[in-house]
Image (spheres, grey):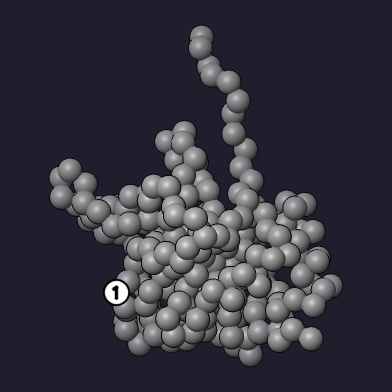
Amino acid sequence: MTDRNVMLAFPHAGTVRAEFMMAVVRLAAGDSPVGEIADRESGPGIGIARNDLAVRFLSSSMDWLWFCDTDTVISDATLPALLDAADEQDRPVLGAVCCILHDHRVRTATYATTRDVDGTFAFTHLGELPADTLLRVDATGCGCLLIHRSVFKRLSEANAEWDRLWFAEMIVDTHQLGEDLSFCMRCAMAEIPVFVHSGIGVGHMKAVMLGQVTA
């Protein structure tokens, strides 16, 4: 039997998509590495929900926290592939490639740090990713993110004010960062590497408008 050393955690707004629900049912019923499943109803402050879920994770015996958002579409191979590529020491934070809509364009939620024209800090989307490659990135989203439990201890040791607030939103050079980029910023400050694997892709279900408003 597979070692059940992963907590699957997901914030939600009271409902979940059927694709996500069926994936969770398969994980719970099958021989998967998921030993516990935790949810947290969330309003606009999703960082609060993620922090609460992380605290619940740390009180468990699980080694890995797997954030998988309820609008993410995964396969039965997603988690095994992440666990195979992750490493407690070298790759303790590892994400799958998840696409988002930004400025009406489909981009991957993978980022590098840069500077705006006025010299202030900013994130920029990475371009096309090389195929089937482990990539160290400055930040990625939490839609499908695997985190080793040691990461939270290292973050809290790096800055005591971060304890239990690992996903609290940050403001950097007047830019308000989301909870996912804020978490990655803290990892960078604590010298914790963040990776994505371009060979592990997941779907992202979003409502979009078709056509154009012309009059």
Q: Secondary structure at mark 1?
A: helix
> Which three-letter amino acid code belongs to the residue tagged 1?
Met
Residue 8 or residue 128, whichever sits in front: 128
Q: Position of residue 84 (x, y in %)?
A: 59, 76
| Residue plotted at (38% across, 51% down) | 126
Residue 161 or residue 28, whichever sits in front: 28
| Residue plotted at (42% across, 81% down) | 90
| Residue plotted at (79% across, 86% down) | 1
Q: Position of residue 143 (x, y in %)?
A: 56, 59
Figure quadrant of residue 130: bottom left
> Of all residues shown, which one is farthest toward the top?
215
In the displayed structure, 80 sits above or below 68; it is below
Q: Position of residue 193 (x, y in %)?
A: 38, 74
> Of all residues shown, which one is farthest toward the left?
118
Say whether residue 30 is visible.
yes
| 157 on left or right of 78 | left
| 12 on left or right of 141 | right
> Of all residues shown, which one is farthest toward the front?
131
| 131 on left or right of 81 | left
Q: Position of residue 91 (x, y in %)?
A: 45, 77
> Of all residues shown, which one is farthest toward the bottom?
61
| Residue plotted at (41% across, 70% down) | 194
Residue at mark 1: 189
In the displayed structure, 80 sits above or below 61; it is above
Figure quadrant of residue 11: bottom right
Say whether residue 48 is visible.
no
Residue 62 or residue 85, whichever sits in front: 85
| 204 on left or right of 114 | right
